Image: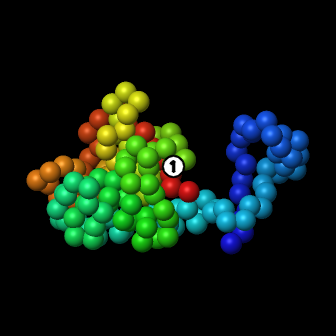
Amino acid sequence: MTAQVHVPFLSARAGTATVLTLAAVGGSMIVPGAVTDAQAATHATTALKIAASKKGSPYRYGATGPHGFDCSGLMLYAFKKVGKRLPRTAQQQYNKTRHISASKRKRGDLVFFHWGRSVYHVGIYAGKGKIWHSPKTGSVVRLEKIWTRSVWYGRVR
């Protein structure tokens, strides 16, 4: 697969002349295996629907489905179903995503709950300030309002 990808910023020293040239002529380039924003949005929306379809599944520490999940296991499961690979833990998933601001969040983006610099929980953004997630022992996969401002957002590439 080949996709046209917009280059939003210049950050690498290596290949600067090439990137600067691209920026001067429109800021796009062809990258084999890359995913367009539209394709990423489709994957994210489908992953959101898959996570929501697991409503009521029990929380199980370390579980990745299909009948029980922990928080990161639910994200791994939903994105795997759309052909996207995510690491196992919430912190690793945060490290793998493209970090975005709250104002840029969209349905299907991941919501990472943190304490200081450490991520301790993840859910998938459903819109209107809500997430689908598998919260804790004794609970089930459910839709819930984001309860804190200590969150970061990430987009699966």
Query: Relative to the observer, which residue lies in front, 126 or 36?
Result: 36
Question: Residue 57: which quarter of the image?
Answer: bottom left
Q: From the image, which quarter does the C terminus lie in?
A: bottom right
17 lies left or right of 140: right
Q: From the image, which quarter does the N terminus lie in?
A: bottom right
Residue 143 appears in the rendering: no
Residue 34 on image: x %, y %: 66, 62
Mark 1 Cα within 10 Å, few/some/many (few <14, many 20+)?
some
Q: Which residue is mark 1?
A: 97
Counting every numbered tag in the picture gives 1
Query: Relative to the observer, which residue lies in front, 136 or 102?
Result: 136
36 lies left or right of 68: right
Residue at image location 33% in from the left, 30% down from the top:
115
Residue 98 position (above or below residue 81): above
Residue 88 on image: x %, y %: 39, 54
Residue 44 on image: x %, y %: 47, 62
Residue 155 position (above or below residue 31): above
Question: Residue 65: which quarter of the image?
Answer: bottom left
75 lies left or right of 141: right
